[in-house]
Amino acid sequence: MQQDLITINPTQRSGKPCIRGLRITVYDILEMLASGMSYDDILEDYTKLNKDDILASLKYAADREHKTKLVPMSA
């Protein structure tokens, strides 16, 4: 399951979601993708990662976005 690839440890990277206990965060991967890096570019630069790690990061971000609730502002 892809969600099992995302770990959160309060003593690692300030508790940010990381990939398989590595010091690479979901944010790091999203930032790389947003800057235009391809999956192959990321995997070449970070040899401990694999395609499932990238997909898990995207899934994690999509799930977080889906759970975001709008809070009406008081008038």
Image (cartoon, rainbow, N blue to C red):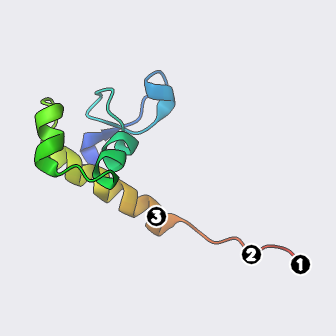
Q: Residue furthest right?
A: 75
Residue 71 at x, y = what percent?
Answer: 70, 70
User: CB of mark 2 within 8 Å of CB of mark 3?
Assistant: no
> Residue drawn 30% across and 28% down?
21
Give the labeled residue for mark 1.
75
Q: Secondary structure at mark 2?
A: loop
Residue kind at label 1, given as amino acid type:
Ala
Give whichever of discs 2 and 3 has the lower sequence position.
3
> Residue drawn 64% across and 72% down?
70
Q: Quadrant of residue 12?
A: top left
Left or right, residue 11 beside residue 40: right
> How dense is the environment of label 2, judged by Cα within 10 Å: few (below 14), some, or many (20 and up)?
few
Give the labeled residue for mark 2.
72
Q: Is residue 62 above or below residue 12?
A: below
Give the labeled residue for mark 3.
65
> Disc 1 versus disc 2: distance between alpha carbons?
9 Å
> Residue drawn 25% across and 51% down?
56
Residue 51 at x, y = what percent?
Answer: 13, 48
Residue kind at label 2, given as amino acid type:
Pro
Residue 31 at x, y = what percent?
Answer: 36, 47
> Residue drawn 46% across and 36% down?
16
> How dense is the environment of label 1, judged by Cα within 10 Å: few (below 14), some, or many (20 and up)?
few
Residue kind at label 3, given as amino acid type:
Glu
